[in-house]
Image (spheres, rainbow, N blue to C red):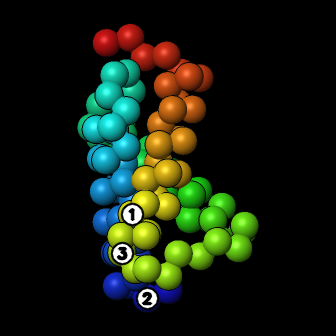
C-alpha cells in the first residue's frame, strides 16, 4: 500500500464515520468519537467484505458504501454495549 492509498483509505473511513453518525443520531461520543468509530468500522467492513470474497470494483462510491456499513455496525454495537449519558 502506498501513501496515496493510505490517505484515501483514511478519508473514506472518516467520511463513513461522519455519515454513519449523521444517520444514526442520538447517543454516542459525538462527532470525533463517531469519526474514530467510523474509521475502525470501515477497516472492519472492508476486511469482512474481502474475506467473504465480495470486492466492490466500482471505485470510491462503493468503498464509501462498504465503509459506511462497517461504521454503522460498529457505532450501533458501541451504543448497545457502552451507554453514554450526556
Residue 39: tell me if it is visible: no
Q: Where residue 78 appears, x then y in whole percent?
A: 53, 30
Q: Which residue in the protein does label 3 denote? A: 60
Q: Secondary structure at mark 2?
A: loop
- 32 up-or-down from 55: above or below: above
Q: Secondary structure at mark 1?
A: helix
Q: Earlier in the sequence, mark 2 or mark 3?
A: 2
Q: Residue furthest right?
A: 52
- Residue drawn at point x = 40 percent, y = 80 percent: 59
- Residue drawn at point x = 43 percent, y = 60 percent: 65
Residues at marks 1 and 3 touching, judged by CB atoms closer than 8 Å: yes
How far apart in space, not on screen, are marks 1 and 2 (Cα)? 19 Å
Q: Which residue in the protein does label 2 denote? A: 2
How far apart in space, not on screen, are marks 2 and 3 (Cα)? 17 Å
- 28 up-or-down from 6: above or below: above
Residue 26 location, quadrant: top left
Q: Which residue in the protein does label 1 denote? A: 64
Say few, some or many: other residues with alpha carbon within 10 Å of mark 2 (under 14 / 14 to 19 / 20 or more): few
Q: Is residue 67 left or right of residue 24?
A: right
Amino acid at each position: 500500500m502506498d501513501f496515496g492509498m493510505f490517505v484515501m483509505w483514511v478519508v473514506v473511513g472518516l467520511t463513513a464515520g461522519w455519515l454513519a453518525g449523521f444517520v444514526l443520531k442520538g447517543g454516542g461520543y459525538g462527532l470525533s468519537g463517531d469519526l474514530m468509530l467510523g474509521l475502525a468500522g470501515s477497516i472492519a467492513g472492508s476486511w469482512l467484505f474481502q474475506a467473504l470474497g465480495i470486492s466492490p470494483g466500482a471505485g470510491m462510491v462503493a468503498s464509501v458504501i462498504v465503509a459506511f456499513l462497517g461504521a454503522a455496525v460498529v457505532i450501533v454495537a458501541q451504543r448497545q454495549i457502552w451507554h453514554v449519558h450526556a
